């Protein structure tokens, strides 16, 4: 059995859908003022189907219509959803139609009400509405005025003259349609929480709780063919405060074992200040990562293993020492920071190819210019520089793995750079680019002259010289 609830004067702030969920979880929202519920088995709670209809009408007084008045609803019960919808919309109060008696109950309804579901609540502007209106106009020309008149026509003749659309209308008029409800699916919530019986102070029992929540979360992601690139952990502590952590993953995945190891490593690096009494775990669902391997390209290591390796290194070396270098917006020499590995965006190769192939776009060829790289010494080499004439003429520097010594034959500079005078780590120095002459022996040729370009600088605070790097 199906029950249809219809309210012709419901206000904008009232939802019949929420009202219908109080009686059955199987619900179809046909319109804002019309819902259909599957009441099969509800007789055990309300005594009979008619008792259920009376209970629906009684509880409907809690709803409000425009002006603050009580809402009166029409309730109809029938063996199929379409018959219940027609009865609720055109009969006031409570209507009960026994299975097999649909034509008896609906036979006197006007033929114009047949297209209610097919054209979208009598909206003639919706796509396909004009075709149904043409069929109704044909029926009027035939002298068909009610459901009973249309139902008496032979189905073979209706199919030959009106096609499948006419057959649908004929089934609606006869009250013999068989279909399932178009159920409303609530959006999934990817969040799990648990309140603990006793406070947790150790990592091992916390791992069991996290594994349970992650198994449920990943199972739901698998059910919806989704993954996640962000995990949020919300811990309620024994002292009344909260401890929150967020894991931003560089790619989407849904392996609960990897999530568990990442969360445990993060908890070891950022432990909560007190015992845990409640735990909540949520994630942001995204589409999973799809990769296509080439036939002749060796398989790359799994991305999950890379993320675990980075997490272990971050625990050993510190989070600020793992990642990729990024130059800072500063004039301080060699100023950089370590940031987390992340993709800036995807390259649209298709659009890029189109731009290249577009004949209206002129691409100027880039000349092949010689490039010079600068190899930085970390830490810089401390040097002894002869600068008696005001500029460097001789240099000598060494370390365990490299050495620089010789006569300076060419130079450029100095370039003075200072900054951050208000801080304790202020900097001020003079920089030079110098060519150092050195000699080597190659076979029979001896004393062959070589020149190597270096960047050197002198600290203005103490006059110490350093070799910053070499030009390759």
Image (cartoon, rainbow, N blue to C red):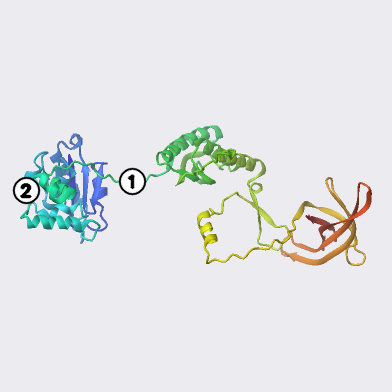
Q: Which mark is residue 104?
A: none
Above or below for 72 versus 312: below
Question: Looking at the image, which residue is at 55% across and 42% down?
Answer: 272
Horizontal side of residue 245 vs 149, given as left or right: right
Q: Nearer the viewer, residue 243 or 269?
A: 269
- Point out residue 115 in the picture as x, y percentages from the top left corner: 17, 53
Residue 317 in the image, given as x and y percentages of width and height: 67, 43
In the image shown, does 58 or 174 lie closer to the viewer? 174
Res. 305 image quadrant? top right
Q: Residues within 10 Å of mark 2 (few under 14, many from 20)?
A: many
* Foreground pick, 382 / 130: 130
Quarter of the C terminus within the rendering = bottom right
Is 9 left or right of 266, judged from the image as shown? left
Secondary element under disc 1, as helix, strand or loop, is loop
Q: How many residues crowd around disc 1 within 10 Å: few (fewer than 14), some, or many (20 or more)?
A: few
Which residue is denoted by mark 2 in the rendering?
A: 148
**Between residues 420 and 384, which one lies in front from this camera angle?**
384
Q: Secondary structure at mark 2?
A: helix
Name which residue lies at 7% across and 47% down. Answer: 153
Q: Quadrant of the N terminus?
A: top left
Question: Residue at the spot x=23%, y=56% of the render?
Answer: 128
Give the total number of marks visible in the rendering.
Answer: 2
Q: CA distance from mark 2 to mark 1?
A: 39 Å
Q: Position of residue 138 (x, y in %)?
A: 11, 56
Q: Earlier in the sequence, mark 2 or mark 1?
A: 2
Residue 186 is tagged as 1
Q: Is residue 58 visible?
A: no
Report the side of 217 relative to 398 (left or right).
left
Residue 186 % position (x, y): 33, 46
């Amino acid at each position: 059995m199906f029950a249809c609830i219809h309210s012709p004067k419901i206000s904008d702030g009232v939802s019949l859908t929420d009202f219908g969920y109080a009686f059955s979880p199987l619900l179809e929202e046909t319109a804002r003022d019309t819902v259909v519920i599957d009441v099969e088995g509800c007789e055990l709670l309300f005594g009979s189907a008619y008792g259920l209809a009376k209970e629906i009408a009684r509880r409907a007084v809690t709803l409000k219509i425009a002006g603050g008045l009580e809402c009166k609803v029409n309730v109809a019960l029938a063996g199929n959803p379409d018959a219940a919808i027609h009865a609720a919309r055109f009969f006031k109060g409570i209507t009960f139609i026994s299975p097999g008696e649909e034509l008896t109950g609906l036979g006197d309804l006007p033929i114009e009400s047949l297209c209610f579901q097919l054209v979208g609540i009598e909206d003639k502007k919706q796509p396909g509405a004009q075709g149904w209106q043409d069929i109704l106009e044909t029926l009027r020309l035939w002298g068909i005025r009610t459901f009973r008149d249309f139902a008496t026509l032979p189905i073979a003749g209706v199919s030959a003259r009106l096609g499948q659309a006419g057959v649908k209308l004929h089934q609606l008029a006869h009250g013999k349609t068989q279909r399932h409800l178009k159920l409303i699916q609530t959006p999934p919530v990817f969040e799990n929480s648990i309140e603990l019986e006793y406070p947790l102070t150790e990592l091992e029992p916390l791992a069991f709780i996290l594994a349970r929540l992650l198994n449920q979360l990943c199972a739901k992601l698998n059910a919806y063919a989704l993954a996640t690139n962000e995990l949020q952990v919300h811990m309620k502590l024994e002292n009344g405060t909260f401890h929150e952590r967020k894991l931003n993953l560089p790619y989407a995945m849904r392996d609960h074992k990897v999530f568990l190891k990442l969360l445990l490593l993060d908890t070891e690096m950022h432990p909560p200040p007190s015992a845990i009494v409640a735990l909540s775990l949520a994630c942001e669902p995204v589409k999973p990562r799809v990769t296509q391997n080439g036939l002749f390209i060796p398989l790359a290591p799994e991305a999950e293993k890379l993320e675990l390796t980075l997490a272990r290194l971050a625990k050993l070396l510190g989070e600020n020492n793992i990642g990729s270098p990024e130059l800072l917006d500063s004039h301080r020499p060699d100023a950089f920071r370590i940031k987390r590995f992340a993709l800036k965006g995807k390259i649209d190769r298709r659009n890029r190819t189109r731009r290249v192939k577009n004949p209206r776009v002129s691409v100027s060829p880039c000349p092949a210019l010689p490039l010079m790289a600068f190899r930085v010494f970390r830490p810089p080499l401390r040097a002894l520089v002869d600068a008696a004439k005001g500029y460097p003429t001789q240099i000598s520097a060494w370390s365990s793995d490299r050495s620089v010594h010789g006569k300076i034959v060419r130079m450029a500079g100095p370039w003075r750079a200072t900054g951050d005078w208000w801080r304790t780590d202020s900097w001020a120095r003079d920089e030079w680019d110098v060519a150092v002459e050195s000699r080597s022996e190659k076979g029979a040729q001896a004393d062959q002259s070589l020149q190597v370009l270096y960047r050197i600088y002198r600290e203005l605070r103490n006059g110490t010289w350093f070799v910053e790097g070499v030009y390759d």
